Structures are given as structure tokens and as C-alpha cells.
Image (cartoon, coloured by chain):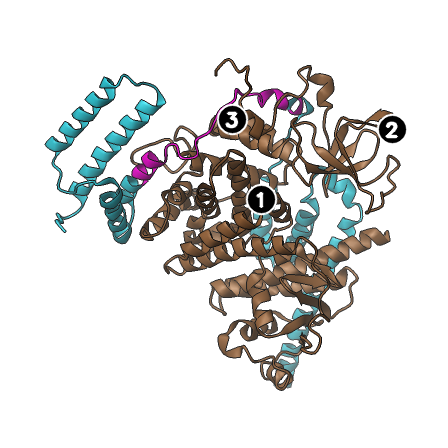
Amino acid sequence: MSTVHTDSRQRNAVVNFAHSLVNAMLNRLMHAWNSDFVAQAMQEVVDALAATEAAGLELPLRLQIDGNRLCHDGRALDGPSLQARSLIQRCNDRNIAMLSFEAHLDASETNRIFDLLLLPENTRAFERIHRDATLLAFGIRHFKVTLQNPADPTDRRVGLDDQGRAVEQYQDLAEALQQNHRLAHGDHELAVDATSTAVERAIVEFDEPSMLLSLAMKDDCDRFTVGHSVRVALLALQVARTMGASREQLVRIGCAALMHDIGKSKVPQEILFKQGRLTKDEWACMAEHPRLGAQLLIEQHENVDPRTIGAAFCHHMGPNGGGYPDPLMPTPPSATSRLVRVCDVFEALTAVRPYKRALTPIEAFVVMFRNKQDFDPHWLQCFVKTLGLFPMGTRLTMTNGADAVVVDQTSSITKPQIRLLSGPDGTPLPADHPEFVVAGDRLEGSSLTIAGINLPDRDLPVPNFDEHDPAEGAGHTAHEACLAPHPHDPKL
Amino acid sequence: MTGRADRTSDAREYQEAIAQWHLAARTEVKKSSSLPSAMFDTRDPMLEARLAGSVEVMMRCLHKPEATALLEQTLDQESEIRVERVTLEELLELPAAIQEEHVKLDVESGLSAEYLSLLIDTCTTGDEATQTAARDLLLRDFSVEANADLHHATQAVFASIQSVLADGSSGDDTHERMAELCSAIAASVIVDHDFPQDNS
């Protein structure tokens, strides 16, 4: 087996372990310490640790806390970090620089580690003078912590790149949503303000949500579909911004998209996380989540925007009121709800689930156009035009054999701007000499046409759109199409 | 007594051995199945995970015959893995499908009618606390009167229809306004019928 393959397996094993740790933390926050959900989550941590050893990593496995991210071996684990605000915050509160997990760690011991990390009365448990005694008293023998060195606060940092701020914003969104799901699950009043604050910060900090969106693709810690909801919110913000929505409108649309699945916190977890097919009764229960979500929000009537209530209720309804649930007075969903629906379905199609593989964006667009009666046609068009057939971050293979990544959209949805990653023979290009070109341009005598999309698990060949489409440049960007109508448009 | 203690000890060791064997077997399956992963994953990226799951269930069946039902259930679930197929022809047709005339979208459209409809729905489907909240919102945001009688409601509809017809408008906007009016009437009736009179 090649070294690259081994490294990749080890890296994946560490990422899975970190995801399981984050998931265990979220379970502890949500459920009683002795519940079945918590027990299962703790066992998953133990299994994931064993898997890292099976992948060839030496234990103890060390995870560093670096500012707002989890790291391993000096490399940031962005995916698991995105929903890890609670874990990282508590480690920072306790001045923990590194967590070390040793062989023979068991589920019960893992659960006790979270006692120390979670309970407010244990905030000082890891202080240098009684750290070892505390661990011994709690029967924790296969877990160690390394504390920050106050004399040298930079000794544990691996260096944040420019994504550091984006990670923080993403964590804000995820944490706000997690908090609301926890509150809803426990029949407490929602913290709606936290959601709008997080959305507002994300909007103010980032002119284009695409940086956050590219991060979102790394997040698959799917507790209560938090990752899904954050991605839907970022997609909705991206499209609404392109449509010229004001900042106030963006905050409201972002909140509505972020909270659209809040009703799932009222669906029994054995149904919500069931791996197989739902029975008729289970499905009926699941299909109530839009109504439950809307009712939950209506109860907080003092400070919830009608868009948020509408998106929670209508995100499974078609543009003319089809789908579910079926309200007493059928009314077509509002523009916000119709936008959220488009983003929701796109995200679901492009995400990996236990029962399906992930589609590429271009495949998802085809599937959505196949069922276009289920979507608002204008939003669907604008959505595709905003993202482009090859959204930012898409890995491509060019017809000359070079590898490339999409870095921006152009006026043609079939011709994104790309950065070449390798030459035609597959030789990687130096990182400091990026070659930016537009797909379809000529480079060194040959046309750089997109041949396929590279996925971690497969390659998807794509046709040459130029050869088959005489109306070259068809399908302009959303901004051009929707905000700056063509002067010769006969409808003007 | 000694014999019984030994048997208990043996049983515990046996259970531990089985557990260790389970773990080792799972690891081996994962290792083996990942060797040709590129080949498998081209068609189905979930194959490796499902293979490991199936083998684990089979091992459980060997250990506990009653687990056969679980195996059948698992195999049944596997057949439900959904794979959407998209052809090259469909990809080719996509740019042509995205050539809609230029439309300026109003992100605010339909909001009021949707909100009203959902409040009405909640007045009839929610629990008591939720119904009360929805009713409060109807009173606050739509000035729905709990004590409005049907005669007044009918007059309001009639007047509204006249005003809509008088301004000569038609199309989606008119439809939306009419739907909103009807919803408002329904809200009045629902609030009137579902709640005790409240003059506060």
C-alpha cells in the first residue's frame, strides 16, 4: 500500500475520531449522562480510537486545542472543529492545550472524562496542582491532558491560516443552532437572538459567504442536522445576496434557513436517527416536523420573525402548496420559504447519508430540474446561476490531463475560473505559482476544457458544453440575469 | 462450588474472547475491503461500510441464532440504498434549461399570506399553549377580532372584493390579496369559535 494511501487512511481515522468526540460531547449536552444515546456515543469514541490504531497510528492519540480549532500532529482538523465550539470552549476554560487518548480507554471512562469537561463545578479540575489526583479519583487512567504553558502562550499554536476567522464564524452559526435544538428538546424557551446575532456576524464579516460555504463541505458531524442547516443557511444567504437583498433581509432569511429544521428536535430520536426504512407510523411522525417546528417558533411569538416560522412550516411544500404538511388554509409558500426549499433539497442531494451517496452539484441540478414542478422556477434558476454548474471548490480534470479547482464564477455558468493544480502529466504545480485561467481558454496551444469532476470516491465525466451548445455563453450569472436585465429584453 | 466458579470464569473469558474476536474481525474486514476501494467506490462509495456491517451481523448470527431477524432486516435495508443516476444527455441539456427570461425576485412576496395561513393552522392543530400564542399573534399582527360575527365578516369581504374589482387589477397580486382576505375571515371565525370570548 502506498504511503499516500496510508497517510490518507490515518488522517481519515483521526478525523473520524474527532467527529465521534464532538458527537459524544453534543450527546452529553443533550441527554442524561446514563442514557442509551450517550452510552452509544461513548462507545463510538472508543471504536473510533481503536480504528486509528488499526490504521497504523500509535496511541496515545493526541488532539491539540489551537485557538478555535482541533488539531492533530500540527494540522488543523477543520471538519470536526466546525461543530466543536462547546468542546473547544471548555478546554480553553480549563487551559487545556492537548487531549491524549490511550489504548484500553473504555466507554464508561470516556463518559467520566466528559463529567470533568462539562460540569461547571469541575472547571478547576485540571489545574496543575491536582490534575493527576482528579483523574485518579474519577477512575480515568487512559486519558491525559496537557495544560497550556503560561510562560509561552504561543508554544501550542500551529498557526492559523486565513480560514481561522471563517472557522470561528461557522462555529458561531453551529453553536447557535445547537443551543436552540437543545433548548427545544428540553422544552425550554428558544434563544432566537443568538441565531440572528450569529447570522449577522457572518454577514458582516464576510462579503461573500462562499468562504464559509467551502468550509461547510468539511462538516459532516450531523447532530440534529446542524451541519445540514448551516449549509442551507449559507446557500440561502449566497443566493439572496446575489438577488440584492438588504442586510436586514439577509439576516432574516439567514435565520429562517438556519432554523428551518428546528421541528426535528421534537421528533423522537429513535425515528430521527433510524438507519433503515421508516414504518408508516414513523414516517407520519417524521412528516410532522415542519408543523412542530412552526408551532415551537409561534410559542416564542415575541421575537420570532414570520419568515422563520414560514420556512419551518413550508420547506417541504411545493411552490403551489403541494408536499407536506397540508395546512388548513392552503397558501403558496412565501419567497423566503421557496428559497429555503431549493437550498434544502440541493443540500440533501449533495450530502452523504447512510442510505444514499452524495451527488455532485451538477448532478443535483439535473435531478432538481427533472422535478422542477416541486420548486419555484425563478429561485431554481437563480440558485443554479449563483452557484454555477461547477461551484467554487469543485475539483476538476481537464481534457489535457491537468487537475484544477474552481476558484470563481464567470459570466458563463459552464466556464468557471479555475486554478491549475497540476500539469498535463499530473506533476503538481508549485504552490506559490498558481495558474488562474477560465475553463475553455487556450493554454499552450490547446483548449483547457473540463473533462470531469473529481470526487473522493469517484470521477464524473462531463460533456463538452461548447461543442453541443451553439448559443455560447448561455446561462449568465444570477446577478446579470436577475438584477441587470439585458437592454434588448423584449419584456422590458 | 469450585466447578461452578470455574465455569463462570470460563464463561467470562469466553465472552471476552468473542468480543476481542469481533473487534479483530471488524478491523480485518475494514482493512481488506479498503484495499481495492478505488474499484468498489467508483460504483458505490457505501459498499465498504455496508460490507463491514453485513459481516458483523453475520458474526452475531453465528453467536446468537435469534439475530437472524436482524440480518434479514439489514439485508432489506441494503437494497434501499438510493443511487440517483444522471446521464450525459441530461447534463448536456442543463445549460439550455437555465435560460429563463430575466426576472427580478422579490424576497418579501407572499410573506403576509403565508404567516396568516400558518397562524390559522396552529389555531386548530397546536396544543393549548400554542393555540393561545397563535391567537395572540392573530390579534396583534392581523387585528383579527375574536368577537367579530359572520355578518360583519361577510360585509368586510364584500367591501374588499368591491375595492379589488374597482381598481381594475388582476393577476397574481389580486389573487394573493383575495386569498389573504379569505384567510383573515377564516381566522376571525376560528378565533371566534375556538376560544372563549375575551375582551381584554
Which residue is depicted at the point 52% across and 29% down?
A380
Instruction: From the top left corner, tell me how far across and down residue A133 is, in percent.
Output: 62, 86
Specify the quadrant that holds the N terminus of chain B: bottom right
Which residue occupies 67% across, 30% down?
A410
Precedes in sequence: disc 2 or disc 3: 3
Q: Are marks 3 and 1 on the same chain?
A: yes
On residue A444, which mark appears?
A: 2
Disc 3 secondary structure class: helix
Mark carried by residue A372: 3
Marks 3/1: CA–CA distance: 30 Å
Q: Is residue A474 magenta?
A: no
Query: Which of marks 1 and 3 precedes in the sequence?
Result: 1
Q: Secondary structure at mark 1?
A: loop
Residue at 60% over, 74% down = A109
State which chain disc 2 sits on. A
Q: Quadrant of residue A125?
A: bottom right
Res. B84 visible in picture: no
Circle 1 residue: A207
Q: Earlier in the sequence, mark 2 or mark 1?
A: 1
